[in-house]
């Protein structure tokens, strides 16, 4: 790989957990890196290690993606750096408690980080990649995108949004040479649990996935160009059946009158 042909991946939430694991694996695949997170010290330590082990170039960008001006700086990097051909939208958070009990400011931060930031960054990257005729976007959602009953409500909703947005974006950008993958982890050993006041030890060890196992599996799905990758799901036919049933609902929505069960019965 020559200097001019080297590609670059921009990874958000790269100071720990899934983001740091992506940085490691992508560097070993030959990518230069742009690491984005609030914790610059951690990213610099990771950058030194990866540069020493892989000889890749690693830039560190300190940014709080709950702040619009910081998101704008990363958008500018995605638009202006033609070497970047992969965006990993990984940064995210969960609430302490639920959306009914958490402070409003925390809910606003969650929406900014889990919804607004990845939407803006994927849009900036998608347009830039489409102009160049190639590129890929990985949006880290969650299996909770498909689960209404668990966690804090807002986190689930934000990941459901990201799943829907990713699939729509893939349909728009695929013909322009841009691949979009939605990654749906389940319980993964990261710091998000501690930060949201939850103990990962409440889960049986056999259901907790290591971040490197997760990312290695995600990259298999990436190489296969899956639009949705669910690493813990053993029976892929279950997902296919779910998605088929979802699509089968759509013709039933095309009805200009209420369904019979919603019509008032008039007494004679």
Image: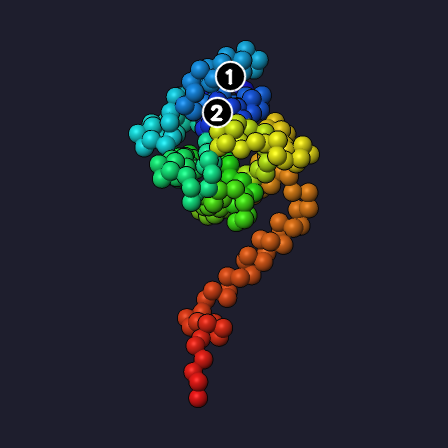
- Residue 203, quarter of picture: top right
Could you classify mark 1 by the number of other residues whose Cα lies within 10 Å: few (under 14), some (14-19), or many (20 or more)?
A: many
- Residue designated by label 2: 14
Identify the colour scheme used. rainbow
Left or right of 49? Residue 80 is left
**Mark 1 near mark 2, Cβ–Cβ under 8 Å?**
yes
- Residue designated by label 1: 46
Residue displayed at 52% across by 49% down? 148
**Residue 129 at x, y = what percent?**
42, 35
**Residue 221 at x, y = what percent?**
60, 37
Left or right of 112? Residue 190 is right
Q: Secondary structure at mark 2?
A: loop
Specify the farthest residue to the left. Answer: 69
**The C terminus: image quadrant:** bottom left
Could you classify mark 2 by the number of other residues whose Cα lies within 10 Å: few (under 14), some (14-19), or many (20 or more)?
A: many
Residue displayed at 48% across by 22% down? 15
Left or right of 227? Residue 157 is left
- Residue 173, quarter of picture: top left
Residue displayed at 58% across by 53% down? 243
- Residue 215, quarter of picture: top right
- Asked if residue 30 can be seen in this view, the reply is no
**258 w.r.t. 61: above or below:** below
**The N terminus: image quadrant:** top right
Of the numbered discs in the image, which one, if any, rests on residue 118?
none
**12 w.r.t. 95: above or below:** above
How many angstroms separate mark 1 from mark 2 (CA)? Answer: 9 Å
- Asked if residue 259 can be seen in this view, the reply is yes
Q: Secondary structure at mark 1?
A: helix
Residue displayed at 56% across by 40% down? 184
**Residue 89 at x, y = what percent?**
46, 33
Residues 132 and 37: in front is 37
**Residue 47 at x, y = what percent?**
49, 16
């Amino acid at each position: 790989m020559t200097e001019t042909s080297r590609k670059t991946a921009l990874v958000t939430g790269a100071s720990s957990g899934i983001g740091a694991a992506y940085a490691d694996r992508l560097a070993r695949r030959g990518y230069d890196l742009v690491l984005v997170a609030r914790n610059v010290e951690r990213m610099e330590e990771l950058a030194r290690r990866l540069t020493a082990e892989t000889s890749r170039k690693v830039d560190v960008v300190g940014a709080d993606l709950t702040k619009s001006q910081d998101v704008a700086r990363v958008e500018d990097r995605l638009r202006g750096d033609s070497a970047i051909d992969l965006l990993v939208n990984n940064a995210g958070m969960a609430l302490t408690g639920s959306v009914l009990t958490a402070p409003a400011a925390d809910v606003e931060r969650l929406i900014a980080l889990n919804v607004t930031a990845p939407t803006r960054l994927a849009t900036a990257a998608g347009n830039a990649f489409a102009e160049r005729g190639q590129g890929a976007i990985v949006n880290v959602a969650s299996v909770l995108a498909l689960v209404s009953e668990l966690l804090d409500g807002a986190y689930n909703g934000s990941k459901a949004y990201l799943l829907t947005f990713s699939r729509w974006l893939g349909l728009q950008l695929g013909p322009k040479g841009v691949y979009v993958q939605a990654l749906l982890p389940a319980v993964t050993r990261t710091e998000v649990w501690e930060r949201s006041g939850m103990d990962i030890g409440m889960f049986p060890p056999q259901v907790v996935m290591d971040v490197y196992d997760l990312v290695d599996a995600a990259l298999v799905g990436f190489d296969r160009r899956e639009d949705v990758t669910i690493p813990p799901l053993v029976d892929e036919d279950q997902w296919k059946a779910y998605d088929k049933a979802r699509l089968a609902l759509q013709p039933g929505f095309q009805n200009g009158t209420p369904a019979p069960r919603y019509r008032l019965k008039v007494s004679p």
